[in-house]
Amino acid sequence: MRERLKLTAVALIVLLLGAIPAVAQTGRLGGVVKDEKGEPIKGATVVAENPGASPPSFTATTDDKGRFSIIGLRAGNWKLTASAPGFTPSGGQVNVRTIGGAMPPLTFTLAAGAAGPAGMAGVNTKELQAELEAADAKLSGGDYDGAIAAYNAMLAKTPQLTLLNLQIGRAYRMKKDYDSALGAYKKILEGDPNNERAKIELGMTNLEKGDLNAADAALSEAAQGTSASREVFYNLGEVKFAKGETEPAMAAYQRAIDIDPNWAKPYFKLGLGKLQKADTAGAIQMMEKVIATEPNSPEAAQAKALIEQLKK
């Protein structure tokens, strides 16, 4: 009976991993970047990141009034970072919704400092913003070669925007050209060896490529940082799970929860791990956490279905 339960649990895991539906609707964020005196900052860069979304990152630049806009965001938690020449970057988490009206405008106030992408003086930010939106539209629309060409054209004119390599890497991954994607992420790390996002994408690209050891190495290195984020540990858990290392995977998911106890995705994966170990009660407990934490998430819908199956 226990063996039968274990086989059923494994079958459910396989179904669930392939059954989470994509969110069709998208949201929009906008706002302004200012200095400490309240003056708008022209040419600031705003990056939105969510490793669970597709695409996982967007980049925008501010106009002469410090305004920015990002469209095409999937529902969920996004990490936003604003930076500008001569200022210290500022950021935070935003829960993007796709229903219930427009998101309220955001305001980033940057303190004077040495950080930020240098050399933006003289750049036509309105033109650059239009080019970014056009390139992002190509990427979202499946024109990967066109998107890569557009991003590279922007980099040729404004080479300091090295974070565009995140989008370039994503486009190559969608083409399954993993070596080129890895090359794009490595370009970011050449100038910024501690860039967490590039390390995560490096790890996940190696996972998609099938090089589990390289993926493990990249994410394990990122996890050693004193400010390693929830995304680092979640993705490390994904790699460990793919390698069949259930206990280390569950430990990584737990670290993600420790950082952000209001994130449903690692609870969901902990539940699958417990199910794999035939711990039905533990799996149900985790799935209930998923529903309580983010009741409208795709994971919550899957958790409800799984609970119904397990309680039959």
Image (tube, rainbow, N blue to C red):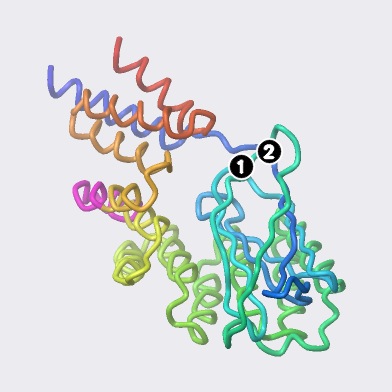
- For the residue pair 124 and 92, the one nearer the viewer reads as 92
Indicate yes or no whether the magenta region holds residue 173.
no
Residue drawn at the location 44% of the way across and 82% of the way down: 193
x, y percentage for residue 308?
Answer: 37, 15
Residue drawn at the location 48% of the way across and 65% of the way down: 201
Q: Residue most toward the left?
A: 2
Tell me whether circle 2 and circle 1 mark residues in contact (CB < 8 Å).
yes
Q: Amino acid at mark 1?
A: Ala
Neighbourhood count class around disc 2 (C-alpha, 10 Å): few under 14, some 14–19, many 20 upward: some
The residue singled out by tag 1 in the image is 75
Q: Amino acid at mark 2?
A: Thr
- For the residue pair 66 and 239, the one nearer the viewer reads as 66
Q: Tell me which numbered mark, 2 or 1, is placed earlier along the sequence.
A: 1
Q: Where 151 sits versus 278, above or below?
A: below
The residue singled out by tag 2 in the image is 98
Secondary structure at numbered mark 1: loop
Q: Where 161 sits versus 75, above or below?
A: below
Residue drawn at the location 42% of the way across and 21% of the way down: 304
Which quadrant does the C terminus fall into? top left
Residue drawn at the location 45% of the way across and 36% of the way down: 18
Q: Quadrant of residue 236?
A: bottom left
Q: Where 241 sits versus 98, above or below?
A: below
